[in-house]
Amino acid sequence: MTDIGRMLLFSHEDCLGHAEPPGHPEQAARLMAVERALAGFDLDRRAAPLAGRSEVLRCHPAGYVAQVEAAVPADGWSMLDGDTWLAPGSLTAALRAVGGVCAAVDAVLVGEAKRAFIACRPPGHHAETARAMGFCLFGSVAIAAKRALDHHRLSRVAVLDFDVHHGNGTQDLLWDESRAMFVSSHEMPLYPGTGAARETGAHGQVVNLPLRAGSGGAAMRAVWAPALARVRDFAPDLILVSAGFDAHADDPLASLEWEVEDFRWLTAAICDLADQVCGGRVVSALEGGYDLPALGASVAAHVDEMMRRA
Ligand SMILES: [Zn+2]
């Protein structure tokens, strides 16, 4: 039997260099809170590599990549959309975030570990094909899904997104991709406004689970249990997770009112499913989560549950 190593944690200090304007919720302190929360964990810690241009081009046109590159300021900030800013270190940070998820997929698919968590920023799930939005530049998780399919030649992958905001970018990037099932739960109505249940993808492979403000953990479990059964029927070879923790009750940007134990329950359910369908392989990447204590506690529960079940 192959010896599977410890769970992997990909991060990089360059991801602190994506400095947002003062008062912006997507701040470098988020990553420091995550690092503190995971400090005592027995993880195989690796540096997130810079993604090559060819990886980004799996999902974004060259013209868009050039537009982002040209917008990077020499100092201060430049604005890509109403809430998405670039600092001098932002492009490097975003390429670490893409590279981290891709490297985690590579490591898990060659059997170095069953599970991986990527603690990088900026997040990615709002970035559309040629449009930065919602704090996101490149669709890191969708890019890694494409890499798993096209480079590693997997037949099917699933992307599960429990960030409180709809993963409109991931949905856009994978809309026509019959080999990638995308499931997103999110508060609705809320930014970015997409994610209605009637949005089902070009091949019926997109599953949206809108939840009402204040609906809490019970409503979450009620929609995710049948959705995970659908993922089981899809039989993915790998499960990717867009792990946002802004559905927590203390988060300032939303009001789904989940608790740490709800993130733990959902993580356990995802890992159990992975054990059944894909040899336990789960690659999970940080998306949102803006209350620092809640973010730290929720990430700790998420990673602890992934390790416990590895
Ligand atoms: Zn979010």
Image (cartoon, rainbow, N blue to C red):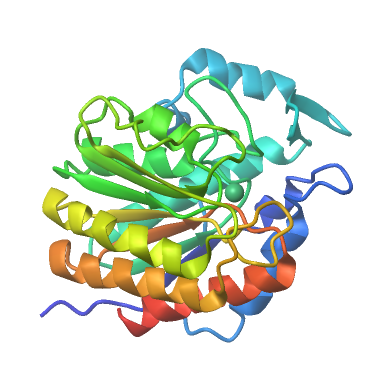
- Residue 237 visible, this angle: no
Q: Quadrant of residue 83?
A: top right
The residue shown at (31%, 77%) is 5
Quadrant including the N terminus: bottom left
Instruction: Report x, y in % for residue 178.
Output: 20, 32
Nearer to us in this view, 219 or 224: 219
Q: Is residue 92 above or below residue 29?
A: above
Nearer-the-camera pick, 262 or 215: 215
| Residue 297 relative to residue 209: left or right | right
Which residue lies at the image location 18% right of the left edge and 44% below the top edge?
A: 156
Relative image position of residue 103 (x, y in whole percent): 40, 52
Q: Quadrant of the C terminus?
A: bottom left
Residue 66 position (above or below residue 118): above
Side of 17 relative to 138 (left or right): right
The answer to whether 173 is drawn above or below residue 28 in the figure is: above
Percent x, y of residue 306 = 38, 75
Using the rendered view, name the quadrant where residue 176 is placed: top left
Farthest residue in the top direction? 63
Which residue sits at x=56%, y=32%?
193
Q: Using residue 99 as the reference point, say whether residue 310 is left or right of it.
A: left
Please tell me whether residue 148 is drawn above or below residue 230 in the rendered image: above
How far across and how far down the image is residue 192, in percent? 59, 34
Can residue 162 be seen at all in this image of the molecule? yes
Q: Nearer the viewer, residue 153 or 280?
A: 280
How many numbered tags mark residues here? 0
Q: Residue at x 47, y 42 (%)?
A: 140
